[in-house]
Amino acid sequence: MFRPLVLLAAMLCLAVPPKIGEWQSLFDGKSLHGWRETGFTGRGQVRVENGAIVLRPGKPMTGVTWTGAFPRSNYEIRFEGARLEGSDFFASMTFPVGDSFCTWVTGGWGGDIVGLSSLDGWDASENETRSYFDFEKGRWYAFRLRVTDDRITAWIDDERIADVAITGRSVGLRFGEIELSAPFGFASYATAGGLRKIEYRLLQPPAEGVTAARP
């Protein structure tokens, strides 16, 4: 009798939507529960060490993709990331934007370019969100991204890195295997990256008839 009651309680908890503005954890710090290794060709090993997801260097990419539901718009996501080895992007995040997806590239194209891929078909290295950030190897940085119906805004350690209007623009993914990270996932490129403290929150209730993005 006890076990069915426990299962019923767990199911009811899962059915209750998160409160608006309340941060929800996506990583328990102990396991890959809720995540799967992204099926990149030549991917490296993924493991959990010292409370962090570690993406070992791939040939070229390694990643993890969230297997549960995730909002399409009007949300914030925050996490901590570190480049542990290598010199390219280590915690690039692919995320939903309405009916499409986008990638926040963190330290690509040689290690210091940050931006959104893609806007109107232009990569992060080519559009107006491109900026340069000197990532210190082994240091943990706080990343935060906000997606609304009309804007994408991003911060690193509370410094606003990107703030771009997307109304009337084409938002999409760069052609290639990064599409395997959708709807929500992280990737590194020939580099070891660490991820921890992954959380998201809703900024307003989902619009009627809008379902969550799923893999």
Image (tube, rainbow, N blue to C red):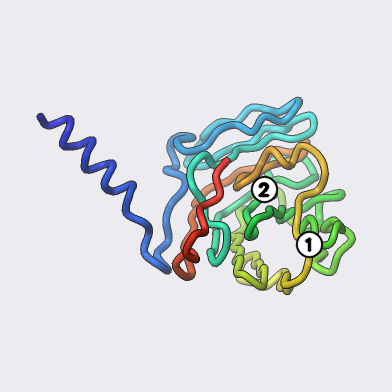
Q: Residue at image x 75%, y 27%?
A: 41
Foreground pick, 138 / 76: 76
- The image quarter containing residue 127 is bottom right
Q: Residue at image x 77%, y 53%?
A: 107
Which SS class for mark 2?
loop
Tag nearer the camera, 2 or 1: 1
| Relative to 208, 123 lies left or right | right
| Relative to 117, 11 lies left or right | left
- Circle 1 is placed at which residue position? 170
- Tell me which amino acid carries mark 1: Ser
Q: Is residue 15 above or below residue 130?
A: above
Q: Residue at image x 78%, y 36%?
A: 190
- Tell me which amino acid carries mark 2: Ala
**Percent position of residue 180, x then y:** 69, 38
Q: Residues within 10 Å of mark 2 (few under 14, many from 20)?
A: many
Foreground pick, 143 / 179: 179
- Circle 2 is placed at which residue position? 91
Q: Is residue 20 above or below residue 18?
A: below
**Could you tell me which quadrant the C terminus lies in?**
top right
Q: Residues within 10 Å of mark 1 (few under 14, many from 20)?
A: few
Which SS class for mark 1?
loop
Could you tell which of marks 2 and 1 lies nearer the N-terminus?
A: 2
**Could you tell me which quadrant the N terminus lies in?**
top left
What separation in Å lies between label 2 and label 1 (alpha carbons)? 24 Å
Are the residues tagged 2 and 1 within 8 Å (C-beta)?
no
**Percent position of residue 67, x then y:** 52, 39
**Percent position of residue 109, x then y:** 86, 50
Q: Is residue 182 above or below residue 23?
A: above
**Percent position of residue 51, x then y:** 47, 42
- The image quarter containing residue 154 is bottom right
